[in-house]
Image (cartoon, rainbow, N blue to C red):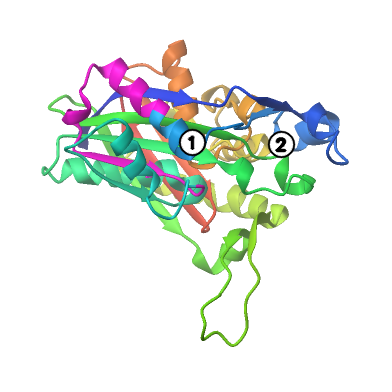
Amino acid sequence: MEQLKIVATAHQVPERVVTNDELSELMDTSDEWIYPRTGIHNRHVVTDENTSDLATAVAKKLLAESGWSADDLDFIIVGTMSPDALSPHTAAIVQGNIEAGNAFAFDLNAACSGFVYGLSAASAFLSSGRYQRGMFIGAEVLSKLVDWKDRTVSVLFGDGAGGLLLERTDEPVGLIAEELQAYGDRGEAILTGRFANQNAFAGEISPLDPYFHQDGRSVYGFATREVPKVLDRALQKAGLQADDIDLYLAHQANHRIIESIAKNFGQSMDKFPTNMAEYGNTSAGSTAILLDELRQSGQVKPGMKVAFVGFGGGLAIGAQIWQL
């Protein structure tokens, strides 16, 4: 076990809430159509914020909760597929905003697996012994990537950010095992933000397509088939059975997918808490937002064994088993 402690968690979502009924004014849809298929009633969307604004708010909350100074941080990682810009990267903006002068910073894009992949990177830095304290934030403003006339995509996504502080510790807590897997040969199932080839030597100018595209049926089949396999391998590495896990915190993409995973492992949905009804799919932010809400409510507490599970664009899947 890598001896690491989750010191603090926090999240931030925009105030503006868009209901399914409100979406029905923009497109041919309804709450009766959306909710049974996805488990989503609402999503939060930005009005004048961007990804770095949500991430910075999370960073400030984390420091306030922990009592740490920004100077205590060795690194800041932001998981996002919707940065403010390609440069400067979002983590650098956050580092500047909170004046974390001793921290290096970078973004990590693993889409909806971003929380698990980012947590893996943060854990590896700390377990190397070269660093003592780090911050990971999953932050997304997906509302700028969706076509709000496309009901197959726009109904799914929301904006939000969540994060945590990690430190090395001598306590018997931390990362027990993980399994990360990429399926790049299937990546066309989820496409976002194709850049135009505009160089002066190009024979043909390729079109710019900023919007999110998803083959929903393929993604659903992929997730329900492959996620249980990856999670099972993580459990095997940990030497644990499915019943040994107190809670499974899965990426909040679709309620039916999570129900399928729970059924595959013979577990009650009580062990697979969800919050996508309020937030929709916030990609790299979803698991972090859920974790913070559960810690605040006392449903996640020290001593628990928790599995984090991410899946989505890439295609990619990640699973980690933690002793809290």
| Residue 73: in magenta span | yes
Of all residues, the one furthest to the front in this rendering is 200
Give 24 or 265, whichever is nearer the viewer: 24
Res 322 quadrant in image? top left
Q: In this image, 135 relative to 258: left or right? A: left
- What's the mark number on residue 285? 1
Quarter holding the N terminus?
top left
Q: In this image, 96 relative to 213: left or right? A: left
Above or below for 130 versus 316: above
Quarter holding the C terminus?
top left
Q: Is any part of residue 60 visible from this angle?
A: yes
Q: Find residue 86 and report its horizontal and vertical position in percent.
A: 43, 55
Foreground mark, 2 or 1? Answer: 1
Above or below for 121 versus 31: below
Mark 1, Cα crowd under 10 Å, few <14 / some 14-19 / many 20+, is many
Ranked by sequence position, the earlier of labels 2 and 1 is 2
Q: Is any part of residue 245 visible from this angle?
A: no
Q: Find residue 282 and report its horizontal and vertical position in percent.
A: 56, 37
Mark 2, Cα crowd under 10 Å, few <14 / some 14-19 / many 20+, is many
Give 43 or 25, whichever is nearer the viewer: 25
Of all residues, the one furthest to the top in this rendering is 298
The three-letter code of the residue at mark 1 reads: Gly
Local secondary structure at mark 2 = helix
Give 81 or 164, whichever is nearer the viewer: 81
- What's the mark number on residue 142? none
The magenta region covers 57-82
Q: Name the residue under label 2.
A: 38
Rendered residue at 55%/84% (across/down) = 202
Give 310 or 141, whichever is nearer the viewer: 141
Rendered residue at 88%/41% (across/down) = 28
